[in-house]
Image: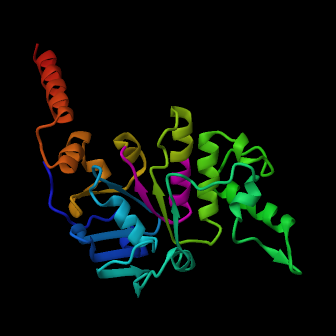
Amino acid sequence: MTTAPHHVAKPGTEARGNVLSLSGIHKRFGAVQALTDVSLDVAAGEVVALVGDNGAGKSTLVKVISGVYQPDAGDIELAGKKVKVGGPRQAQDLGIATVFQDLALCDNLDVVANLFLGQEKLKHGAVDEIAMEVESWRLLRSLSAKIPSVRIPIAGLSGGQRQTVAIARSLVGDPKVVMLDEPTAALGVAQTAEVLNLVERLRENGLGVILISHNMADVQAVADRIVVMRLGRNAAEFRTEDVSTADLVAAITGASDNVVASRAARSGAASKEQHDG
């Protein structure tokens, strides 16, 4: 059963306060109303999953937060202060980092070069390779990352290791909020577990994390709260421990009669029959 949108914070997050708050966000593209009165709160040290079907408005909302799109109406607040995100560079300067699904890594460059691409450290007018290498190891250690060397070309890394580098790169500017767009898409079981561990490290480091994913198992494994979007609006919001996969599917589709709910009902009925027997 779908619930009405409401704010539910992880215990203790109220004291830390929200690092990011969106309210009344609207975005239209010509005749298409992509977002309507969307709200979203993320506290420090909290993972908020953003889920919804294709066309629900998730990607548009992420692009509004990251400065790619400008909202037609609504407010964005960082640490309680209203801000205008004029573009991706400004978002980065404000402390909003985004790791998009395509990762945007350069296969021919090594880990260090990818981490500092476009924001290289300089010393006496020259690129400071030593300082960047030291900082690269610090960032990777903060994520408990399994990268054998920071001088390996990206082409020689696995999918999970590439995702690790992309997430580590998002931390170079010391952000307050990190958005991860489908971070486990096309990864195997072991690599997915590796990436979900990275999400846990981000939370432990006190960052606000927005996780966009279609994988309900991943979402339920690491998220503190789950925000469901449908047709460009807030559809429901749950504490992760209080919601089942069937409830999530019902909220995403807008229908309680779905294959997941039916399977859960049959399983429950079979268990009850076995117990009674």
Residue 102 is situated, as x and y percent measured from the top left of the image, at 53, 52
Left or right: 244 as drawn, with respect to 156 = left
Residue 198 lies in the magenta stretch? yes
Task: Indicate whether 51 appears above or below 90.
Answer: above
Instruction: Tell me if residue 137 can be seen.
Output: no
Residue 155 is situated, as x and y percent measured from the top left of the image, at 71, 43
Residue 20 lies in the magenta stretch? no
Q: Residue placed farthest to the top in the image?
A: 277
Residue 201 is situated, as x and y percent measured from the top left of the image, at 56, 55
Figure quadrant of residue 34: bottom left
Left or right: 57 as drawn, with respect to 129 = left
Observer-nearest of 168 and 56: 56
Task: Indicate whether 31 appears above or below 185.
Answer: below
Instruction: Tell me if residue 131 can be seen.
Output: yes
Residue 63 is situated, as x and y percent measured from the top left of the image, at 41, 67
Q: How many badges with numbers are in the image?
A: 0
Task: Indicate whether 42 appears above or below 270.
Answer: below
Rendered residue at 64%/39% (across/down):
158
Figure quadrant of residue 135: bottom right
- Residues in magenta, as a range: 197-214
Left or right: 191 as drawn, with respect to 233 = right
Left or right: 260 as drawn, with respect to 171 = left
Task: Indicate whether 81 appears above or below 17.
Answer: below
